[in-house]
Image: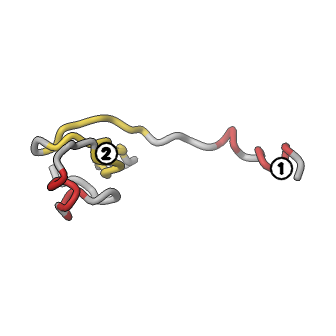
Amino acid sequence: MQLELVLEGMENMTTPDYCRISHQGVPMLVEKTDGGRKRIARLLSTNPADYLNADYTPGKFLED
């Protein structure tokens, strides 16, 4: 496959706007969406119980 076909459109791609925050004492990486909301991308916690909490599932939006 030609490299030009593989890379076609890549210059128009945008990268997500990630930031590290601590929400209710749990460190996480969140993505800021266009509407100003924050979506959990990844937990950074060392506490195993945080990973079992359904409120911190990656993909969920944080309620402020």
Q: Earlier in the sequence, mark 2 or mark 1?
A: 1
Q: How is the image coloured?
A: secondary structure
Residue under the point 17% across and 61% down: 53
The residue lying furthest to the right in this view is 2
Q: For the point 22% across and 56% down, which residue is it?
A: 51
> Which structural element holds mark 2?
loop
x and y, in percent, of residue 3 in the image = 85, 44
Kindly identify the amino acid type of the residue bearing the numbered disc 2: Gly
Q: Is residue 42 left or right of residue 23?
A: right
**Mark 1 — residue?**
5
The spot of residue 2 in percent (x, y) is 89, 48
Indicate left or right for 6 with 59 as reference.
right
Up the image or down, 58 lies above or below 19; here it is below
Q: CA distance from mark 2 to mark 1?
A: 34 Å
Quadrant in which residue 12 is drawn: top right
> Which mark, by number, is residue 37?
none
Q: Would you say the residues marked 2 and 1 are in contact, meaning their CB atoms lie under 8 Å apart?
A: no
Q: Characterize the local packing of mark 2: few (<14), some (14-19) or many (20 or more) Cα atoms within 10 angstroms.
A: few
* Residue lying at 33% horizontally and 35% vertically, measured from the top left: 19
**Residue to which mark 2 is pinned:** 36
